[in-house]
Structure formats: structure tokens, C-alpha cells
Amino acid sequence: MSNLAKDLMTANPQCCNADTTLNEVAKLMVECDCGEIPVVDADKKLIGVVTDRDIVCRIVAKGQDPCGKTAQDAMTQPVISVKEDCTLDDVVATMEEHQIRRVPVVDASGCCCGIISQADVALVASERETGELVKEVSRESVAH
């Protein structure tokens, strides 16, 4: 196995649009048993991601009603992604640098074609590499 992003990723992840309601985004997370939904435009180009934490921190914790909000209101952008031909080392380096537990994968045209989680990395990386990834992603970051 070549350990490229396209070999590691979960292909064709469930995506949503910027105007998808947060209730619908949350339902997609439950149905797909995942904590992140990529946000794409009409051409399927990746424009952001919504995590369960985004919904809690950006909407609920601020006392806003998630029922009246959309993916656009909670999504993280600009979005960090990797290309489908990136190596495992590049994927891990990206996740560590940006302290993210999941990273969307895009094809040559910028369309979302997959997603890679820490668990996906753990299945193919050494215990040392996996431990380092978890350590780096979990380290305390300096507040902005």
C-alpha cells in the first residue's frame, strides 16, 4: 500500500451546503457517526467544515438558537485540507501543524472526495507516529 491520502481516506463523505440548517448538519453527524461535515459549494468545491465543537462553541455557548442557524454560521474557514495524492507524512504534518483531528481530502479540482481522521492514520502508521500525532493535535495552543 502506498499510504497516500486517497488510500487512507473515507471516500465520499457526507457533505452539506452553506445554507444547510445546523439541525440537519447535526442529524448528518448522527447518521454518519462522525463529528465533522465538510461544507461544499454548488460545484462540490470544499469551502469549510462544521464540527460538533463548532456548533457548541460558536452557537450554543453564545446563547444562540441553533434552530435558526446554518452551516455558514458555524463553519470553520478557511478550511485546511490535503490533496488526494499527499503522502501519509504530509497528512500527519498538516494535522499536527493545525491541531486538527480530521482533515478533508480534495481532488485536483478542489472538490471534496474524502476525509481522514486520527483513527484512519492509526490503522496504517506506527505506534510512535500515531502517538506523536495525538500528542501534537492535543497540545495546548496559545490563545489568540
Image: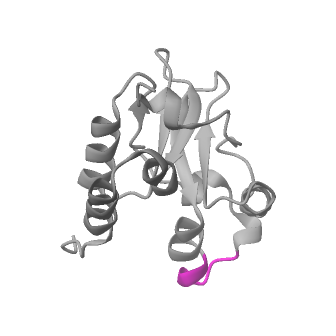
Where's residue 103, x and y in %? 45, 45
Indicate the quadrant where residue 9 lies: top right
In this picture, is 20 found above or below 138? above
Where's residue 102, x and y in %? 47, 52
Magenta stretch holds residue 102: no
For this orientation, the residue located farthest to the top is 108
Q: Is residue 75 left or right of residue 66?
A: left
How many numbered discs, if any? 0
Where's residue 51, x and y in %? 56, 60
Q: Which region shows up in magenta?
A: 60-65
**Which residue is painted at 33% across and 51% down in the image?**
126
**Which residue is painted at 28% across and 38% down in the image?**
89
Q: Is residue 126 left or right of residue 21?
A: left
For this orientation, the residue located farthest to the left is 142
Where's residue 69, x and y in %? 69, 62
Name the image quarter holding the C terminus.
Answer: bottom left
Residue toward you, 15 or 32: 32
In this picture, is 74 found above or below 112? below
User: Coloring scheme of the render?
Assistant: one colour
Indicate the quadrant where residue 10 lies: top right
Q: Is residue 144 left or right of residue 73?
A: left
Residue toward you, 99 or 76: 99
**Which residue is painted at 45% across and 56% down in the image?**
118
Residue toward you, 26 or 66: 26
**Which residue is painted at 64% across and 21% down in the image?**
43
